[in-house]
């Protein structure tokens, strides 16, 4: 019997992702990746909420590689398993940096390790919600047969560009007669990349010859000319005051630049009942903007118009525009110039034919423009922008024809030349579509950075009062040449393994799965309206590439009805939207269960929003609960949950109940067909029996305390989801939210029970810290608590845990501990004191601080041999949990850092032990 309906009698090997992961390294590189632009695949074309490549690479590896505990034939003892697991962690730490993607030595090691766990043959990997292509691309990079599908044609095209096309043309020379001359080979897809650059340059030159007159240069006071980067406009409506009636500029802010050395702003001037504009600065301040959330102010008469009037004028198509400033390129600076008649006239063009007249949705997540009369996609652009975009779109087809001729001249057969030209056109179409993000009338000006802010700086199409029209010929963002160069850099480094990629447009609820290994990043409840947003690009992609991919781009707009999101706008109300999401989710993942390869866990990403957290537990949310409930209804049991944090840098992170992961990665297995039922008492008994050991393994993997509550959901919800039903005392089925709360309660109990491992002084300090943190309490309170733990207040001070004075007692803050501390000469060493001194060194307090000195200190603690060194890490976990509950961010960060650094500390300690002890020159003093 297949694993489609129940697990076979054969024991499935547990995979690494179901046991432990080096999350700190994965999260660090995931966050760092956000600052990498050149050559990064995400720069090929915009898509929303992409997962980091580093995280996808690591999760795929861990999904396919056996955990050493599953191979007792190779690793019979627990110590051998732990050592083998650390080797896998080390390999993951090697593979997750961006630089490793081009290091064939590392990638070969990774592929060999995957093959080793799979008998040399790995099933195909599939992401049925492929989106921006992160998961299929990383599967392809790992040498796996990668399959990607999506209902939306935009990600289908993006994925074809990432995994399907590059391998087909690997190692080929470019066909353009203007291509760079080389005597050596063209590795990977670099030949195709060169052709994309060459034909993109040809497109840009042709476009400039046709429409360049509409983009004049700026004339400076000294008679010289400067390239215009952008024109700044304000929307206008007529003043409703009958005695005035002038065109009111609607301006959010008159600031142009807030650079300290060269501030600049727009100065509106009133003359003959009209508003004109000049430039002010460097001294002085601009006046306040004229429009806000309540309405607009007339600069001439001073009357205010309510926002409803402004909206009505927009709906009636009586909203106009006025140019406020011209931004030109100076010597290492922006030049701000007043508008001239030449520049105003150059922008005055008729709307071209064949523009996207498709309708915007009446309502959609993140859309605000419809209320101001923008009803069609063409309304999001000025006529000049429409002229540029239609010109570039037409040139994609012309470039394809030119590439096909050149390919034939380069001795390609007719069919191959046609296919190659289609490939070149695909990247040119994506590059052109990408420029639309900056060539539209919702783009705004960043006065702090002196540059245009693209429309999709966030996942929405909001209203913009004053907006920017960038020049498509300024060799800056928004210029096709810049976008084409970006596409070329991506192509240069995309993997071109021997195994081809496969991309299809398909509905995840009905497509076949054929025993693929599924690793997927589905839509997230109501976070993002992908289909409505992606229509912005689709209307242009269809115009330029529809003839090449008619099977993908057959519809006027992207499919909406089957999209798996909870959109109240689309379904009428919240309840219907939630029902649509949950039914679709259950149907999809039930279908996946029928076809997923039973030897491997299913891996699913879920994206958290901070606003989703439950105020009480910090772990529940409608979307999160619905997703878990859907997986359980579909017959899956969750075996692990891993937080992937793309927002933090290093170990300095925001702590608090609302500081959740950017994503949670879930590993799931099919629930056994013979699953039994239990009641609340039985569920709690199983939790208390199994969770302590699971948490211990998580802690041994040096999981950061901030990630422990989310990671603990995995083994906790695994207990809950393996039952067919958990009943409440009244006979009703337990809700997922209730189960999450109980898991959280047991986690707190387990951490508190770990106190039994600590010395009495440390246990006293924990209780005191929980009550006072670093504050002062009375001597009487300290004495009472000391009796409960069979210690004395004087002994606590002798152990360097506390200080006292004026009948008060307080814990010593790590930063105030003596730098000369030597654990080997300390007469009353405690776990608490050791942890505080390690924290002091990791925080960089005092001379000789840092990871190296902290490792030397840990080596000395080891030599002392008073207690198991891992109890220091356990104390850090416990103290973090206290800080998390009390929302003591600064202290929480300190203990999170200590636990997160534990593996590095142990490595440094081993190094220090090889060097021998290093004694301080002074004895510890207070």
Image: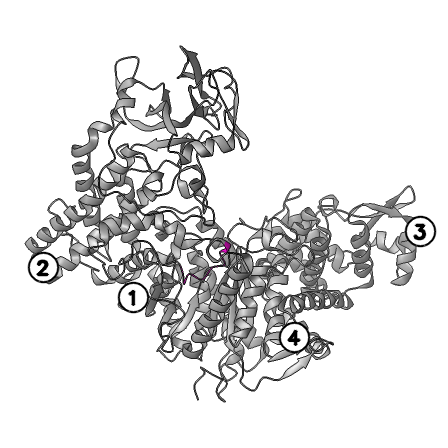
- Location of residue 140 in the rendering, given as x and y in whole percent from the top left corner: 33, 65
Residue topped by disc 2: 412
- Residue 898 image-quadrant placement: bottom right
Judged from the image, the secondary structure of the residue bearing numbered disc 1 is loop
Name the mark on residue 733: 4
Q: Which residues are the magenta region?
A: 561-568
Q: Along the horizontal axis of the image, is 230 left or right of 394?
A: right
Q: Real-space Cα distance between discs 2 and 3?
A: 92 Å
Residue topped by disc 1: 501
Q: Along the horizontal axis of the image, is 708 left or right of 508?
A: right
Q: Is residue 807 visible?
A: yes
Query: Sequence order check: which comes first, mark 1 or mark 2?
Result: 2
Residue topped by disc 3: 780
Q: Real-space Cα distance between discs 3 and 4?
A: 50 Å
Name the mark on residue 248: none
Judged from the image, the secondary structure of the residue bearing numbered disc 3 is helix
Question: In percent of the image, x 44 and y 89: which residue is there?
Answer: 1
Depth check: 336 or 64 in front? 336
């Amino acid at each position: 019997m297949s694993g489609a309906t129940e697990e076979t009698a054969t024991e499935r090997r547990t995979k690494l992702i179901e046991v432990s992961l080096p999350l700190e390294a994965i999260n660090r590189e995931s966050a760092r990746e956000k600052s990498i632009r050149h050559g990064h695949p995400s720069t090929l074309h915009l898509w929303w909420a992409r997962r980091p490549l580093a995280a996808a690479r690591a999760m795929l590896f861990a999904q396919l590689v056996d955990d050493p505990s599953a191979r007792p034939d190779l690793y019979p003892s627990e110590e051998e398993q732990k050592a083998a697991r650390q080797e896998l962690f080390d390999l993951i730490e090697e593979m997750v940096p961006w630089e490793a993607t081009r290091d064939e030595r590392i990638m070969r090691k990774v592929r060999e390790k995957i093959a080793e766990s799979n008998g040399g043959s790995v099933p195909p990997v599939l992401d049925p919600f492929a989106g921006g292509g992160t998961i299929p691309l990383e599967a392809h990079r790992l040498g796996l047969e990668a399959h990607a599908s999506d209902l939306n044609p935009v990600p289908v095209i993006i994925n074809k560009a990432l995994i399907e096309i590059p391998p087909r043309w690997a190692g080929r020379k470019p066909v353009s007669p203007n291509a760079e001359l080389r005597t050596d080979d063209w590795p990977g897809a670099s030949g195709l990349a060169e052709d994309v650059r060459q034909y993109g340059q040809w497109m840009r030159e042709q476009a400039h010859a046709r429409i360049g007159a509409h983009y004049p240069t700026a004339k400076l006071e000294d008679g010289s000319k400067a390239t215009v980067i952008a024109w700044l406009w304000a929307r206008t409506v007529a003043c409703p005051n009958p005695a005035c009636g002038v065109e009111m500029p609607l301006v959010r802010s008159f600031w142009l630049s807030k650079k300290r050395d060269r501030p600049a702003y727009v100065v509106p001037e009133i003359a003959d009942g009209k508003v004109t504009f000049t430039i002010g600065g460097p001294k002085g301040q601009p006046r306040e903007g004229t429009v806000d959330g309540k309405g607009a102010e007339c600069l001439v008469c001073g009357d205010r118009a309510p926002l409803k009037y402004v909206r009505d004028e927009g709906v009636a198509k009586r909203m106009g525009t006025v140019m406020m400033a011209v931004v030109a390129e100076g010597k290492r600076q922006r030049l701000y110039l007043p508008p001239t008649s030449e520049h105003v006239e150059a922008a005055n063009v008729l709307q071209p034919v064949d523009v996207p007249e498709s309708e915007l949705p009446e309502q959609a997540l993140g859309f605000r423009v419809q209320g101001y009369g923008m009803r069609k996609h063409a309304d999001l652009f000025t006529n000049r922008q429409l002229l540029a975009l239609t010109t570039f779109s037409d040139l994609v087809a012309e470039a394809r024809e030119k590439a096909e001729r050149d390919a034939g001249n380069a001795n390609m057969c007719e069919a191959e030349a046609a296919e190659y030209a289609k490939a070149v056109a695909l990247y040119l179409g994506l590059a052109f579509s990408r420029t639309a993000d900056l060539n539209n009338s919702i783009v705004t000006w960043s006065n702090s950075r002196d540059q245009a802010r693209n429309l999709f700086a966030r996942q929405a199409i909001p209203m913009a009062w004053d907006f920017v029209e960038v020049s498509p010929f300024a060799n800056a963002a928004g210029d096709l040449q810049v976008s084409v160069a970006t596409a070329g850099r991506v192509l240069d480094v995309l993997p071109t393994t021997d195994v081809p990629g496969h991309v299809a447009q398909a509905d995840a609820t009905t497509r076949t799965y054929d025993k693929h290994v599924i690793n997927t990043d589905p839509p997230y409840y109501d976070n993002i309206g992908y289909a409505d947003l992606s229509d912005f690009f689709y209307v242009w992609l269809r115009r330029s590439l529809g003839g090449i991919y008619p099977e993908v781009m057959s519809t006027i707009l992207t499919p909406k009805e089957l999209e798996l999101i909870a959109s109240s706008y689309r379904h009428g109300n919240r309840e219907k939207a939630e029902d649509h999401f949950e039914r679709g989710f259950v149907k999809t993942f039930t279908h996946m269960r029928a076809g997923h390869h039973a030897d491997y866990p299913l891996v699913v990403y879920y994206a958290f929003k901070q606003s989703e957290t439950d105020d009480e537990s910090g772990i529940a949310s409608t979307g999160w609960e619905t997703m878990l409930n859907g997986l359980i209804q579909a017959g899956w049991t969750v075996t692990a949950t891993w937080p992937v944090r793309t927002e933090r840098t290093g170990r300095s992170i925001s702590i608090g109940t609302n500081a959740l992961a950017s994503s949670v990665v879930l590993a799931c297995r099919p629930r056994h067909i013979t699953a039994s039922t239990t009641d609340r008492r039985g569920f709690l008994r199983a939790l208390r029996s199994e969770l302590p050991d699971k948490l211990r393994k998580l802690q041994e993997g040096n999981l950061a305390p901030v990630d422990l509550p989310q990671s603990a959901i995995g083994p906790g919800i695994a207990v809950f989801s393996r039952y067919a039903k958990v009943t409440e005392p009244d006979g009703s089925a337990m809700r997922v939210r209730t189960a999450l709360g109980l898991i959280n309660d047991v986690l707190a109990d387990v951490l508190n029970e770990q106190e039994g491992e600590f010395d009495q002084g440390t246990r006293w300090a924990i209780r005191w810290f929980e009550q006072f943190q670093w504050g002062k309490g009375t001597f009487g309170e300290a004495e009472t608590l000391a009796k409960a733990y069979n210690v004395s207040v004087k002994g606590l001070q002798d152990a360097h845990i506390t200080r006292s004075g004026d009948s008060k007692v307080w814990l010593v803050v790590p930063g105030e501990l003596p730098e000369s501390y030597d654990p080997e000469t300390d007469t009353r060493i405690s776990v608490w004191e050791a942890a505080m001194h390690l924290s002091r060194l990791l925080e960089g307090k005092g001379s000789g601080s840092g990871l190296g000195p902290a490792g030397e200190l840990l080596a000395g603690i080891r030599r002392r041999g008073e207690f198991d060194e891992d109890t220091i890490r356990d104390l850090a976990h416990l103290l973090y949990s206290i800080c998390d509950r009390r929302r003591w961010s600064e202290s929480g960060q300190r203990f999170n850092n200590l636990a997160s650094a534990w593996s590095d500390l142990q490595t440094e300690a081993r190094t220090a032990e090889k060097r021998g002890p290093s004694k301080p020159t002074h004895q510890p003093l207070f």
